[in-house]
Amino acid sequence: MPELAFLSIGSNIGDREANLAGATTALGTYYQINNIQSSSYYETAPLINTKQPNFLNAVLSCETDFTSFALLDTIQQVESILGRPVTRKKNQPRTIDIDIVTHGDAVIQTNELTIPHPEILNRKFILIPLEEIAPNFEIPLLKMTATECLEITNDISRVVKHVMEKQA
């Protein structure tokens, strides 16, 4: 039985729209990942290393037959295909960043993977697009919806819906 998963995707190098679309397309090539839906894209300033370009972010929902760790492996393959170096410094500019926000009702805390995403309560760039595509989804462990999380978050950053550039 497939699990419902939510993924956060972001890019702040190169053609950010194309990077997010490419990541979505690449994930859809795996037969274990189906029914991908994307939120709108959102423009956000970097939170930690602020001396870098703004991010474009979105949240994807999908159904997957992958286990949490197999999904992580797949995400890392897609990031690599899209030009993200395997070894990198934390919080640096990147062509693509894909994080597992939730995976079914899994609650995992290892050095390699933490689900639900450990910073979800501090990340409006995850909560706002999650609320857009799944307003009634209850986040495992937290037992709150994205709307409820937004009401208590300490994140004061601006998250602005991105207007897609028209193609000529």
Image (cartoon, rainbow, N blue to C red):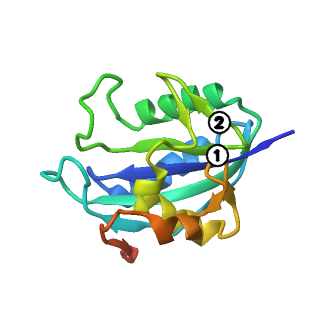
Viewer-nearest residue: 80 or 125: 125
Q: Which mark is residue 141?
A: 1
How many marks the image carries: the answer is 2
Q: Quadrant of the N terminus?
A: top right
Secondary structure state at the residue bearing disc 2: loop
- At 58% from the left edge and 55% from the top edge, which residue is drawn? 60
Looking at the picture, does residue 142 appear above or below residue 2? Answer: below
How far apart are the alpha carbons under marks 2 and 1? Answer: 7 Å
Between discs 2 and 1, the one toward the N terminus: 2
Amino acid residing under circle 1: Leu
Q: Is residue 86 left or right of residue 28?
A: left
Amino acid residing under circle 2: Val
- At 50% from the left edge and 51% from the top edge, which residue is drawn? 8
Looking at the picture, does residue 118 appear above or below residue 37? Answer: above
Q: Residue 28: in sight, yes or no?
A: no
Q: What crowding class fits label 2: few (fewer than 14 Cα within 10 Å), some (14-19), or many (20 or more)?
A: some
- At 36% from the left edge and 63% from the top edge, which residue is drawn? 154
Q: Which residue is mark 2?
A: 107
Looking at the picture, does residue 107 appear above or below residue 37? Answer: above
The reply to whether callout 2 and callout 1 are in contact (CB within 8 Å) is yes
Identify the image quadrant of residue 41: bottom left
Q: Is residue 54 left or right of residue 37?
A: left
- Place of residue 84 in the rendered image (x, y in percent of width and height, measured from the top left): 35, 34
- At 69% from the left edge and 37% from the top edge, which residue is drawn? 106
Looking at the picture, does residue 125 appear above or below residue 31? Answer: below
Q: Quadrant of the C terminus?
A: bottom left
